[in-house]
Amino acid sequence: MGAERILHGCVLPLGDPSHDAVAISCGRIKAVGPLRQVVRLRDDRTVMVDLSGKALLPGFFDAHTHFLQTGLELTYFVNLTPARSLSDALEMLGEAARERPGQWVVGRGWDESRWPERRYLELQDLDRAVPRQPVCAVRVDGHLAVCNTLALARCLAPEGELVDRDRGHLREEPAWELLAGIRLEREEEVEALAEASRHAAALGITAVADMGGGVAMRAYQAARRRGLLQTRAFLYLPWRMLEALVQLELERGFGDELLRVAGLKAFLDGSVGAGSAALDEPYADAGTRGTLLMDEEQLTRLWRGASDAGLQLAVHAIGERAIELVLCAALATGTIPEDRHRVEHLELASQEQLGRMATLGLVASMQPNFVANWGGAGGMYETRLGVERAERIDPHAWVLERGIPMAFGSDGMPMGPLSGVAAVLAPPHAVQRVDLEDALRAYTMGSAWAVCADREMGRIAEGYRADLVVLSADPRTSPREQVRVEMTLLGGERIYERR
Ligand SMILES: [Zn+2]
């Protein structure tokens, strides 16, 4: 039987320089090679697609997302960026509230520095604009959420540096927790996932690991049934569900070609931005050094439980103390590389810690966009950590040097593999520079490795899924602004084409 489709006339930046054609059949890659060989698979129903010199890569795989949240940002949430004044923003929120009586109203993107009033939104403002339903409005930087009285009632965090109840101001974790706890009608969640999937396809993304996977199971299943999910999603569920999964005897990989359970997600510390990442030494701008959210005994028990159950652990660890805790638990449980347990973020790992990490066979799940967001002189990292620590944050190059498997993702801040790749090619601290090919591998086969799907995706090779992205130009030889996503294919089917 011949191929259904043959893509030809392309360059393969991660492949053999002599290869310029890929044959696809039944959703899989049937052959890769020079056109004169691949063309033997052509018959009268084969569609020939001439890519005229464009670049072909495996579809991007975002190894750390919050997919539902991304979708809600694109659909349900009220975009306050166009608000030209504080009263304008209140007007927009009030209107949204009238459109969806009884439901949550969530606004995003307000920026008081562009308003004539020149002040933050306050609880009293929101109470006036939306008196009878919960409303929450997130500032443009994502670090401050303002609530009305009804929304604030859902916040369980204690009053303090991050929670100012008089003003209705929540910062960092308390804000994210409140947002993550907002549940909408299932239809809205399904539409959000569909939109996230469309958006992902336009960015060249064909697969994601969803670190908040547990909150959207029903919506995911509905979207998948109705053909609205066009992204392969690997779900990481809250670690507290270990018992339930053990009872179900449900192992990693359970699901189908689009929707699968991968493992469990646990948090060991917070973030540098919130001053809650667990550091060895105090923050440069505060006397504190962050807090650990688990102790060694707790993590060891979880680790052993996950390994025994055949589930992968994805452990959020940013500061040196959190990373140390991971390494101790991994050693204590005798973890083996086949478990492929992952460390999420791994921002402040020392050289010595990375050495132990390599021996233990743990996977590094990193977000190259973070350095672009917060690195550099005067950036958030430098303010909170001081120059010395800011120079060794997000150690992508060291991770590669140690031979640690590295997966790239975005944490939804925002999604965008091409901008993530660009960030590590020219980081603020040159010592952490990563080659283009290594960065592209981390965003494709590295991520596939990190979810144990490296034998079916992440490469353009015979037998692999035909999840592909066509770029307008070869990123090795063209300036970044000329490299755009032209077309995305999932299982050989076109899911995006640039107009
Ligand atoms: Zn995350």
Image (cartoon, rainbow, N blue to C red):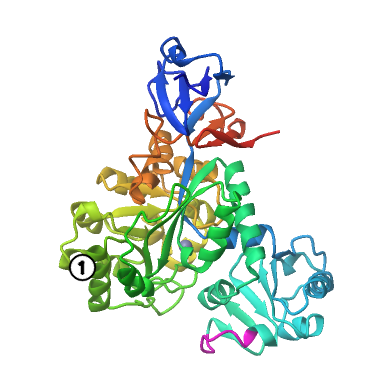
Q: In this view, does 357 lie to the left or right of 437?
A: left
Residue 155 located within the stretch drawn in magenta: yes
Look at the picture and state if 302 lies above or below 394.
below
- Residue that extends furthest to the front in the rendered view of this protein: 1
Q: Quadrant of the C terminus?
A: top right
Picture quadrant where residue 113 is located: bottom right
Q: Quadrant of the N terminus?
A: top left
> Can residue 384 be seen?
yes
Residue drawn at x 43%, y 43% is 443
Element type at mark 1: helix
Residue 300 located within the stretch drawn in magenta: no
Residue 315 placement (x, y as % from top left): 35, 64
> Can residue 278 be seen?
no
Residue 366 placement (x, y as % from top left): 40, 53
Q: Nearer the viewer, residue 457 or 159?
A: 457
Q: Nearer the viewer, residue 276 or 90?
A: 90
Prevailing secondary structure class for the magenta stretch in the rendered image? loop
Residue drawn at x 54%, y 57% is 412
Look at the picture and state if 207 lies above or below 46.
below
Picture quadrant where residue 350 is located: bottom left
Q: Is residue 412 left or right of residue 247?
A: right
Count of marks overlaid on the render: 1
Instruction: Rate crowding at label 1 as few (under 14), some (14 to 19) or many (20 or more) other CA atoms within 10 Å.
Output: some
Picture quadrant where residue 262 is located: bottom left
- Residue that extends furthest to the top in the rendered view of this protein: 36
Residue that mark 1 sits on:
328
Residue 138 placement (x, y as % from top left): 66, 70
Give the magenta part as a residue range: 152-160
Q: Which amino acid does label 1 sit on?
A: Cys
Q: Is residue 279 left or right of residue 176?
A: left
Residue 382 placement (x, y as % from top left): 46, 62
Look at the picture and state if 229 lies above or below 328.
above
